[in-house]
Each structure stands twice: as structure tokens, then as C-alpha cells.
Image: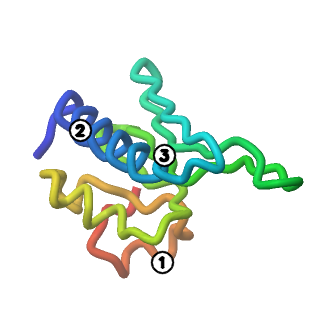
Amino acid sequence: MANIEQSRAIVKTLITQYGKFFAQDKTVDTEIIMDEQRDHYQVLQVGWEEEKRVYGCLLHLDIKNGKVWIQHNRTEFEVGEELAKLGLAKHEMVVGFHVLASRSFTEYAIG
């Protein structure tokens, strides 16, 4: 079982990796947001593609009540699997964008 510092380190590693990956797209800026005091972590894209404004959250993770909450995932990657590869147990993660009733059918924590 990961403690809060281990969970933070794993989340920061993943957020940094994703930030670097999406920063390869030079048409828009990729921003990494890490609020360790409140345990909110995001990867955002901001900028312009010709005449079209681009602004959006690609990935949002929170740490709440000792669990890592996957709040939003607009990537093609399975974030839970990536966190597990980095050492976080699946029962220490909550897929927060799934309705509560469906969470019990996954390998992850309910909440």
C-alpha cells in the first residue's frame, strides 16, 4: 500500500511523462499543473491552431482520502494501467469519471 508521499511521487512522474509527450505537439502549448498542497494534478493544452482556439484538460488526477482519483482522461492511454506500472495498486485508484454504480464492476476502488 502506497503512502501519500509515494502516491504523490507516482502521480507527479506520470503527469510529467504525459506533459512531455503532449508537448511534442508544437502547435499548442502543453502545461503541467501540480498543486501538491491540495493534491490536484493536470495536463492542459492551450493555444491556437490557425483560427481555432485550443484549450482543454487532457488529464486530471487528484489524491483524495488516500486514493488517486482519475478525474478526467482525454488521452488514448489507459491511465490506471500506467499508474499500476509505476507501482500504484489498482485498489488505491478510483476512476472518478465513472458513475458510482459502475465502479464496483472494475478492478479499481469504488471511492
> Does 16 sit left or right of 1 as displayed?
right
Front: mark 1 or 2: 2
Q: Would you say the residues marked 1 and 3 are in contact, meaning their CB atoms lie under 8 Å apart?
A: no
Q: Say which residue label 1 marks.
A: 102
The quarter in which the C terminus is drawn is bottom left
Dot 1 amino acid type: Ser
Q: Which numbered tag is attached to residue 77?
A: none
The residue shown at (65%, 46%) is 28
The residue shown at (54%, 36%) is 31
Cα separation between marks 1 and 2: 24 Å
Seen from this angle, which residue lies furthest top? 37
Of 50 and 37, nearer the camera is 50
Seen from this angle, which residue lies furthest right? 51
The residue shown at (25%, 53%) is 92
Q: Which of the two discs, 2 and 3, labels the residue nearer the N terminus?
A: 2
Of 1 and 12, nearer the camera is 12
Cα separation between marks 2 and 3: 24 Å
Name the spot of residue 47 as percent of width and height, x first. 73, 42
Vertical arrangement, residue 34 with respect to residue 81, above or below: above
> Does 97 sit left or right of 103 as displayed?
right
Q: Say which residue label 3 marks.
A: 23
The secondary structure type at the circle numbered 3 is loop
Q: Which of the two discs, 1 and 2, labels the residue nearer the N terminus?
A: 2
Q: Say which residue label 2 marks.
A: 7
Vertical arrangement, residue 41 with respect to residue 34, above or below: below
- Binning the other alpha carbons within 10 Å of mark 3 as few (below 14), some (14 to 19) or many (20 upward) gives some
Of 78 and 37, nearer the camera is 78
Cα separation between marks 1 and 3: 33 Å
Name the spot of residue 100 as percent of width and height, x first. 51, 67
